[in-house]
Amino acid sequence: MSPKLRAIAVGGTIAGALDILFAISFAAYGGRTADWLLQTVATGLLGEDAYAGGWAAAFLGLAGHFAMSYGWATLFVTVASRVPRLIEKPVMYGLLFGTLVFFTMRLVILPLSAFPYPVSFKPLSAGLDLLSHLFFFGVPIALAAAKNLRRVSA
C-alpha cells in the first residue's frame, strides 16, 4: 500500500471511528440510541425517511459517515503531500483542519443535503461537536498523514 493510501486509510478510519463513537455517546447521554444517531446521519441522504429504515438506514448512515471521513482524509493527505509544512506541525494543522471540517459540514454540506433539521449552533452541542472535530477528527488525520508522508520524503 502506498504511503498516501495508508495515511488516508489509517487517518480516515481512526477519525471516523472516534467521531462516530463520540456522537453515539453524546446521543446516549441525551437518551437516544445508537441506531437513532446513525439514522440521523442517514437523513443527509434519505431525509426523515431514514427513521423508518431501521438498521438498514443506520448502516447507510455509518457507511456514509466513513465515506465522508475517507473523503476528508483524502483532501488533507492530497494537500499535505503538496504543502510539506502541514506535516511538520501536524497537531496545529490538524486542529485547523478539524475547524474547517466542522464549519464546512454545518454551513455547506448539511444545508445542501436532505438533512431535515435547521442547522444550529447551540453552545453545548456545537461546542462539543467542534471539539470532536478538532481532536477526534482533524488531529488523527493530520498525524496519520505526517507519519506516512514523512516516509516518502525521507
Image: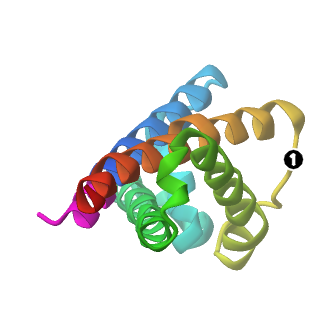
Residue under the point 85% across and 52% down? 120
Quarter of image, res 124: top right
Indicate yes or no whether the magenta region holds residue 81.
Answer: no
Q: Is residue 73 left or right of residue 139?
A: left
Residue under the point 60% across and 70% down? 47
Q: Residue furthest top?
A: 29
Q: Would you say residue 30 is visible in this rendering?
A: yes
x%, y% of residue 54?
39, 53
Quadrant placement of the N terminus: bottom left
Helix, strand or loop for the magenta stretch, by majority: helix
x%, y% of residue 86?
54, 56
Q: Is residue 50 left or right of residue 134?
A: left
Q: Residue furthest bottom?
A: 112
Indicate yes or no whether the magenta region holds residue 5.
Answer: yes
Front residue of this view, candidates 111 and 50: 111
Front residue of this view, candidates 74 and 79: 79
Q: Name the kind of residue labelled 1 in the image.
A: Phe
Q: Would you say residue 116 is visible in this rendering?
A: no
x%, y% of residue 112?
70, 79
**Pointer 1: what residue?**
121
Residue under the point 38% across and 63% down? 70
Q: Which residues are magenta?
A: 1-9
Residue under the point 42% across and 43% down? 143
Q: Residue furthest left?
A: 1
Q: Is residue 135 left or right of residue 104?
A: left
Front residue of this view, candidates 36 and 136: 136
x%, y% of residue 24?
51, 34
Quadrant placement of the C terminus: bottom left
In this view, 109 is above or below 69: below
